[in-house]
Image: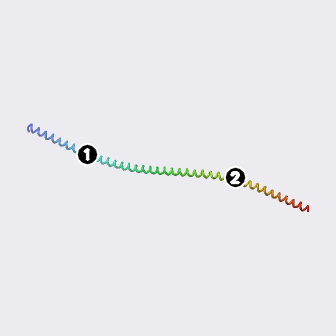
Amino acid sequence: MNNSDVEKHLLINKKNDLIKKRDDLEDQLDDLKRQLELKIAEVERKTSEIDQQTNTLKNELDEYIREKNDLQKKIEDLELKIEEKNSELEAIDKQIDFLAEEIDRIQADLENLAAIQNEKSTLREKVEAEKNAAIQEKSVNI
């Protein structure tokens, strides 16, 4: 073997080593690409799950907001009804006060009427007694 053959043989070995290293690096690259694709798929899957959870939570929140608004409306309606009932109660209280005053006035009128009737009865009895006395005196004088 001459010098040139040795050099050629060394270059071929070096070339083969470089090809092997290149192939190993390509295999590593392919493996990293597969890992990247798996990671991308996992991220997309997790992103999709998170999006679904977010939508579910958003829908639940929207429902809670609707329920809260409905309850607020019911509370406002009930507060208005309570105010109306309070106004009605105040009006009834005023009517009761007026009727109580009327009853007191009527009772006073009835007491006055009873006193007048007692006076009338007493006067009738007195007049009757005087009449009877006058008749008796007339009878005695005849």
Towards the viewer: 134 or 105: 134
Q: The N terminus lies in which quarter of the figure?
A: top left
Label number found at residue 33: 1
Q: Residue at x 36, y 49 (%)?
A: 51
Inspect the image, locate mark 1, and give the three-letter code of the amino acid beneath it: Lys
Quadrant location of residue 131? bottom right
Towards the viewer: 135 or 118: 135
Q: Is residue 67 left or right of residue 114?
A: left
Q: Residue at x 15, y 41 (%)?
A: 15
Label number found at residue 118: none
Residue position for label 2? 105
Comes first in the chain, label 1 or label 2: 1
Q: Residue furthest right?
A: 141
Measuring from the top left, give residue 44's x and y in whole percent.
Answer: 32, 48
Marks 1 and 2 sit apart, C-alpha to C-alpha, by 106 Å
Measuring from the top left, give residue 68's x and y in whole percent.
Answer: 46, 49
Inspect the image, locate mark 2, and give the three-letter code of the amino acid beneath it: Arg
**Mark 1: secondary structure:** helix
